Amino acid sequence: MQASDPTPGQPGVPFAASYAALAVAAVTLLAALLVRELSAYSKRRSMPPGPFRWPLIGNALQMPQVHPWLTYSRWARVYGDILYLDALGQHIIVINSAKVARELLDKRSSIYSGRPHLTMLGDLAGYNKILLMQPYGDELRQQRRLISQTLSISTIGQYYDIQEAEARRLVLRVIDNPSLLESQVRTSIASLIMLVTYGYTVKGTEDVFVERAIEVLENLTLAEMPGTWLVDMIPQLKYFPSWMPGFTFLKTAKAWRKLLYTTNRELYQWSKEHSENGTARVPNLCASVLAEAEGKATLQLEEYLMWAAITVLGGGLDTNTATILSFILAMLRFPDVQKKAQAEIDAVVGSERLPQTSDRPSLPYIRSLIAEVYRWLPAGPLSAPHALDEDDVYDGIFLHKGSILLPNVWHMLHDPDVYPEPDVFKPERYGGSDIEMKKVTDVAFGFGRRACPGFHLSQGTTFSMVVTMLATCDIVPVVDDHGQEIIPDVKYPTKSILYPEDVKCTFRPRSEQAKLALIDSMTDSVI
C-alpha cells in the first residue's frame, strides 16, 4: 500500500524543513514591510517643507482661521513656493508661486483638476451640482461648454450694450445716493448677470431673485469654510437623525439645499417661459442654448443648462462686486492714479460722448489700472482648491494622491520679488504691456481646466463700470463734521471672497454735461 504524503510538523517530516519554510515566509514578510517603510520614509523625506507637524493631528491646531492667505504668505518666506500641511491626515499643499501653479494645474491638469469632497457643502447642502464644486468629469465639461459657447471672446460682444447701460445706471444711482454704494454695486452686477444669463430684468434693490441669489451665495461661503463642520472630518455623522443634540447642522443643510434648488429651478423656468413668449431679453444664455437645440433639448441638457446658468450668477455676483468696490477703494487711496486715468479718457474719448467698450484697445492705462485692481486686492485670495488624482513628483518633491492643493493667489500677486512695493497701487508697473497684465489675470481667474469660464463677461463688466465712473465723476472721500476727508482703510472680513469693508465715498460729476449725458443715455437704454 502506498503511503500518503506526510505534512509538515507530523512524524516523518524533518523539523528543519518546517522551520526553514517558516523562516522563508518570515523573511519575505519582513522584507516587504521594510520595503514599504523605506518607500514611505523616502516619500516623507521628499515631501514639501512646512511647519512642524505633531503626531496624529499634524498641523490641525496651526491651521489659520483668519485671513489664511496672509499666514500662508508668511510661511512661504520660510518654506518656499510649495508648502505642506497635514490636517488630521489630510494632505494639504499650498502653492505660493505662479510658475509652480502653471506647471502643475495647467500643464498637468489631467491629474490636478479634481475637487476635494466636502460632506456639508456637497452631500448635504447640494452645492456639488454647481460647476465650481463639481468633481472633474463629463457633467463639468458639458456645463463649461454651454457657458463658453455663449460667453466666449467671439460671442461676448452681443452683451456690450447691457454692460454699458448698467454701468451708466449705476453711476447715476451712486451720484444720487452714495450711502448705499455696496448694495447698489451688488444690484447692478446682479442685474447685468441675470440679463445675460436668464434675460431677467431686476426690479430694484429688493428684487426677490437677487435677495435669494445673495442668500444662496452666503450659504455657500459658510458651507465651504474649512474646519467649520465636524461632518467634513467625520462623514458618517450625516447619517444621524437631526433631532439629536449637536446635529442641528443637518437641518441647516436641508434648508440651504431647499433654497438652492428652488431658486435655481424657478430662475431657469422663468427664463425658459419668458424667452419663448418674448418677454425676456434675448439673447441670453438659456435662450441661446435652447434655441440651438431646436425644440429637441433633452432633460439631461436642460439639467446641465440650469446648473450652468446659476454657476454664472453665483460665480460672478460676489467676485465682480468685490472687484468694483476694490477699484473705488483704490481711487480713494491713490487719487493721482485717478487723475492720470481720467486724463487718458479725456484725450481718447473726449467730453462729447460717453466711453464704450470699443474704446478699450485705445486705453492702455485703463487696462493697466484694471489689472492692478485684480493684483492689489484679488477677489479670490485663495483660488478654489484642486484635488490631486494620483501620486506625482515635481522638482524632486513627492505629492500624495488625494492631496488638496490651495493656490495662494494673494502671495503670487504680492510677492515683492515679482511685484515690488506690492501694497502700492501702481498701474505703471505693467508698462502698458498686455502681456504683463495677462500674467495677473492668468492667476486671478484660476488655473487649468478649473479656470473661470465667465472670464470675458467679467472683464467687459469691470471695464464698462470703471471707465464710465472715471469719465463722468470724481470719486472723492466723504468728510467728517470738521470738513476733513475720511480715507477708508484697507480691511476685509475672513471669507472666500475678499470684500472691502466700509468703503464710503461721493461720486461728484465732473461736469453738468457729463451728468446729462448719463441721463440721456437712459432714454435709449436696453435695460
Image (tube, rainbow, N blue to C red):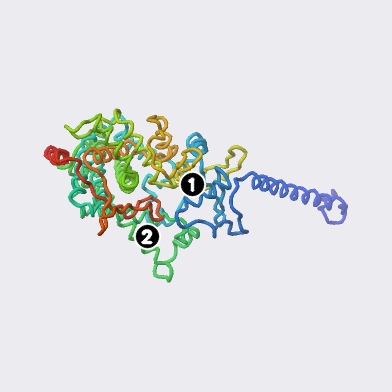
Task: Check disc 2 and report its element: helix, strand or loop.
Answer: helix
Q: Provide the residue designation for mark 1.
A: 406
Position in image of residue 315 (x %, y %)? 34, 45
Give whichever of 218, 521 is nearer the camera.
Answer: 521
N-term mark: 2 or 1: 2
On screen, residue 443 versus residue 474, left or right, reads right
Position in image of residue 482 (x %, y %)? 26, 58
Q: Is residue 139 visible to us here?
A: no
User: Image height check: is 432 above or below 337?
Assistant: above
In the rendered image, the quadrant that contains the C terminus is: top left
Quadrant housing residue 11: bottom right
Mark seen at residue 391? none
Q: Residue at x 83, y 56 (%)?
A: 9
Give whichever of 469, 27 is nearer the camera.
Answer: 469
Position in image of residue 395 (x %, y %)? 60, 37
Q: How many C-alpha atoms fall within 10 Å of the one at disc 2: few (<14), some, or many (≥20)?
A: many
Q: Amino acid at mark 1?
A: Leu
Task: Check disc 1 and report its element: helix, strand or loop.
Answer: strand
- Label 2, label 1: how far apart the Cα atoms are: 25 Å
Q: Amino acid at mark 2?
A: Ala
Mark seen at residue 253? 2
